[in-house]
Image (tube, rainbow, N blue to C red):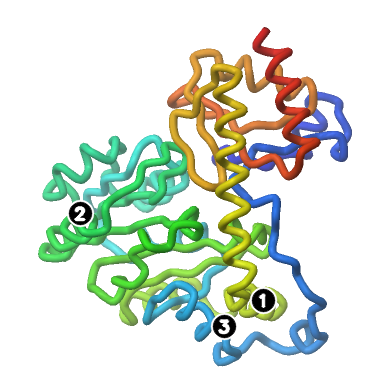
Amino acid sequence: MLEHGGRLHRAAREYGIPIEAWLDLSTGISPFGWPVPPIPPSAWHRLPEDDDGLIDAARAYYQAQHLLPVAGSQAAIQALPLLRAACRVGIIAPGYAEHAHAWQRAGHDVERHPAEVLSANPQRWDVLMLIHPNNPGGERFDVDALLRVHADLAARGGWLVVDEAFMDVTPAYSLCPYADRDGLIVLRSVGKFFGLAGARAGFVCATPALLQALQEKLGPWTLSGPTRYVLQHALGDRAWHVQAKAQLTATSERLAALLAKHRLDPSAGCALFQWCRHDAAPALHRALAKVGILTRLFDDVPSLRFGLPPDDAAFHRLDMALAEVLR
């Protein structure tokens, strides 16, 4: 199992600090989650049904013609490599490590490179895997440029797979509206923007043929009835979407300014996190953990990712802690 953020119980044991005393900044999950309403008993008592309105809500939200609900984009990340024979796969680096792990485990020839190397040589790959915006590298891509790369791949029977887990605040840059094109696969997550990580839910946007093949791999009832009920209402709550985008953007900008104040100028970021390269990242990670602040440590490129503090008190606590550990 690869390392991920959010391992708060392990940190509590390791550092001897109670769970409730931690400020967890180790994930890119919004601290301002969508307010979940009471769930009707029928959602618990009946098997989930595909025609319950969720797909219509998702089509409207993602502006995609064809979607498949999945148990978090992680389910699709693990299953997609099983739909192709062994091939050459280029994956963005640094980036979410589960992508490379899944393709390698399925027997594919995987290379990890920065985005500019991947997009400059699309003929080298049968599958090109990008994260947009990248996690944690923060890269953003021009939609037309991505579509040109896709056209090159698709002409040879290849795929462009784009993980848009952090795209919700900037939907104009999404490739979901183009996912009816052969060889273009877009992954979306509801865990980050909606703060519903515990629901383990996401969507794959692609052609009907590919979605059918993926569904056969995943089997029926990939999402529970209660999850489907919550998602349908969350995706349709347009007033909440507007205020959440503004709140996340302002909070992320405030976080970037705080980090820069302590000479931890972010190397990249988006509305849900800020990423700082730092040679002493492991030591800084441990020093913050000793005072009950959990960050996400990356080893390939020594760096820390900071999720969003939820309120003024959390910002003050991080400010004081950084002043102490960087003194």
Marks 3 and 1, how far apart at CA:
12 Å
- In this orientation, does residue 82 appear? no
Q: Between label 2 and label 3, give the one nearer the viewer.
A: 2
Residue at 62% across, 72% down? 239
Residue annotated with mark 2: 145
Amino acid type, mark 3: Leu
- How far from the left and from the top, in percent, is residue 245? 56, 58
- Gap in angstroms between the C-alphas marked 2 and 3: 32 Å
- Residue 64 visible? The answer is yes
Q: Residue at x 73, y 24 (%)?
A: 289
Element type at mark 3: helix
The amino acid on which the numbered mark 2 sits, given as a three-letter code, is Ala
Residue 295: horizontal and vertical position, in percent?
A: 64, 31
Relative image position of residue 200 (x, y in whole percent): 62, 63
256 or 58: nearer the eye? 256
The N terminus appears in which quarter of the rendering? top right
Residue 54's disc number: 3
Q: Is residue 100 above or below residue 163?
A: above
Q: Which residue is mark 1?
A: 224
Secondary structure beneath disc 2? Answer: helix
Question: Separation of disc 1 and disc 2 at Cα?
Answer: 37 Å
Residue 295 as seen in the image, left or right of residue 117:
right
Task: Name the N-terminal-most of marks 2 and 3.
Answer: 3
Q: Say left or right for 63 vs 273.
A: left
